[in-house]
Image (cartoon, grey):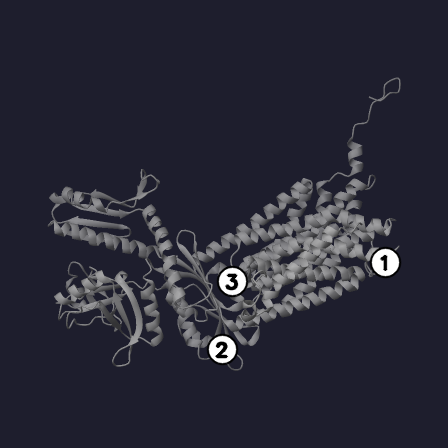
Amino acid sequence: MKNSPFRTAIILLVTLVSMFMVLPNFLDDDTLDGWPDFLPREKIVLGLDLQGGAHLLLQVNREDIVEGRLSDLRRDARSILVNEGIGNIITTRGTVLDIQLTDAGQRDQARQLLSPLETMIETSVFGTGGIAETSIQTVGNDIIRVSLTDEGITDRMSSLVAQSLEVIRKRIDEVGTTEPIIQRQGQDRVLVQVPGFGDSERLKDLISQTARLTFHMVYPSMSADQARAQGLPPGTMIVPSADGIDELLYEDVTLGGEQLVDAQPAFDQNSRPVVTFRFNTQGAITFADVTSHNVGRRFAIMLDGQVITAPVIQQPITGGSGQISGNFTPETAGDLAVLLRAGALPATLDVVEERTVGPSLGADSINAGITAGVIATIGVVIFMFAAYGIFGLFANIALLLNIMMMLAVLSMLGATLTLPGIAGIVLTIGVAVDSNVIIFERIREEFAAGRSAVQSIALGFKRAMLTVVDANVTTLIAAVVLFFLGSGPVQGFAVTLAIGVVTTMFTAYTVTQSLIEGWFKITRSKTLRVNIMEKLLPLEPTIPFMKWRIPALVISGILTVGAIASPFIVGLNLGIDFTGGTAIELQAREGNADIADLRERLLALNVGEIQVQEFGNPQDVLVRMGIQDGDDSQQQVAVAQVTDEVSADYEVRRTEAVSGTVSGELALSGAIGVFVAIICIMIYVWTRFEWQFGVGALVALMHDTVMTLGLFSVFNLEFNLSSIAAILTVIGYSLNDTVVIYDRIRENLVKYKRISLAEIVNMSLNQTLARTILTGGTSALALLALVFFGGEVIRDFTIAMAWGVFVGTYSSIFISAPILLYLGVKTRSDAVADKPKPERRADGASV
């Protein structure tokens, strides 16, 4: 009970540092500019779901890579053979080029000439090893086959992703957005997060458009329609045009966009938007040469496989500059100039996952989160003061410091706060007092056992410490698994939950203990009335829990079977995270949403199955579409059609689009996350207790997981990535309860000699009942505040966690504890009975 000056200094230092770390979040940028250099400036970074913005996951189009590489090989092969007078017909099939020679006798010569096309990928830093990127072999007497290898395609995709990162960064920097996140994911994906960018469609066009600009001569003596009828002339291709008329062009690129040094939006003499461009020295020379030798012929400017314009060359252009005209608006002309200045993407990037949030929804989410947090804090503060009086006041002071420390750590780390992250803070508010409740109830027990006030306080903190650590480690394990296997907002929830666990253990043991010791030194109280609700929550009630275990297990078995069957009978309302598709949240600009009219208008678009439903307020609507037929780009086309149709009457507040490929990966990672969390928690419990305790905890966790899935099915709640986070949180909370009870059972097994296991389990449940009720009450207060005030976006998520408080408490009492009876944990009386009795010799000595 000696109040350490060092500990007091640490608490004061942490409090002051936390205050200064949190303060910048409440100051504007102008004030921070005058802030002293030695003071912190970092603020909590708001996630896209709070400040608005776009999250795009882009994937390199494999088919485009293969087609582009085969096109290069076909052009090179034709050029090589034609120059040597070897006739050939080239056909493409999958990743293979078949070159059929008109003269089979030239096969060996052609094979030798084409050998430079057979390239290798170096796999050794010394250049002594490698794998084939392309392979060449002869088939029959007159066919030479050039094939792309899977390793070669994969390697090319990987290198193109690296190049794409820089191009995307240049494009985003050109439009002036702040603090974008652009990073590689895996071998063939790029993640782009741009906060505060309101026009998601424009952003997608800027990022995903290849912007490959090439110049081709138009074939002079034949139209595209004639070529279709008579056959394509060698070395030509048919390309669609912006004016709707196809053009017949030479395949050879006369000039490429990589030689541009500048591009700017402008207006022509008729005040129509155009894009002016300027070549580098080499490009200017080539441009002048081409235009000089082709006066009177048409010259096509092609962008991403479409002819923008194909004017007639009136005279040589020697200045190295020109202009692109078309059906531009000032904005589209500006965007094209941005694309050309930043350079072309080396490959087509498809949007396989999109999550965009409008600024108005972000502001509503912040307000909802703050409201829920304030209500939860007030509720928990009142509850703790009503239950523990002066001790509750100390717990509340520690709780407020806990919240400030959490915000300070988030600021210091520059962590991203998401809407589920706010839910994590609110949940921590409810669960944080659990450590104090465990300590206070232990102090109450020690005092009731006849110890003095000073002894009770000292022993209460000492003996509760192991239980507090055990209970919080399980939650920390769930948070760590969520962080590494989750994504986006789910990771934000994991971060706040993990920080909350650490700060909670610090405040419970340093702050609360210092406050109680200081109070005791002042008052020198001879008695301790820790829990002022003792009449309602007696120290050790005598509820016969174990007598009810069989009916409880039967009821649990029936409900578990029902929960397992429900998804098969009723179904599970899987979100787009797991099924793929699109969800668009709309808000009527005036009055309430007309769902019937909206459904009729969207069905007329023929974009597949459409679901339109009210979403929270009468003004809000949620539109869901399934995965579109065709490739991933069709999903984006459907999104654009829907948003264009409703833009006049509705504000698009949120868009989520997930491709089938990504949804399958998310489902797998979610299942792995739950499995890994259960395994990690089980390993911890197994090492801390006997194996019987581990089995009991596992059964309880499986019960809670199944019951939570049953809740989603029965009440048709949407099951998505956040639901996985909810299940893991339920698992962590349930095990928290279970570990507290198990710690007491283990202690009583050592303490009592002549009591049966059933009596010990029952006694332990009664001894921890007050803690179970009080912790459940504070957690329920926090979670109900989230359910009613946290907003519609995370309502299903918070309902599942609120349900988990009830289910977790129930399983700790009626599942995990009774399991020990059936597995036969030994008591001290059992150990004494099993111990061999010493034999007596004739002289009476024992052996």
Query: How far apart in space, not on screen, are marks 3 and 2 (Cα)?
Result: 23 Å
Residue 523 bears which disc, if any?
1
Disc 3 residue type? Gly
Q: Is residue 817 left or right of residue 132?
A: right
Q: What kind of residue is marked 2?
A: Ala
Dot 3: few (<14), some (14–19), or many (≥20) neighbours within 10 Å?
many
Residue 807 screen position, x and y as percent: 67, 57
Which three-letter amino acid code belongs to the residue tagged 1? Answer: Thr
Residue 341's disc number: none
Q: Give the number of the disc on residue 575.
A: 3
> So how many labels did they put on this image?
3
Identify the image quadrant of residue 132.
top left
Residue at disc 3, secondary structure: loop
733 horizontally vs 520: left or right: left
Residue toward you, 245 or 186: 186
**Label 3 to label 1: alpha-carbon separation:** 58 Å
Residues 31 and 427: in front is: 31
Quarter placement of the C terminus? top right
Q: Residue at x 16, y 62 (%)?
A: 231
Residue indicated by mark 2 = 596
Provide residue 505's location: percent of width, then percent of height.
68, 53
Q: Earlier in the sequence, mark 3 or mark 2?
A: 3
Residue 15 rendering spot, x and y as whole percentages: 68, 59
Q: Is residue 22 visible?
A: yes
Q: Earlier in the sequence, mark 1 or mark 2?
A: 1
Image: 208 above or below 452 = below
Residue 217 coordinates in the image, percent (x, y): 18, 65
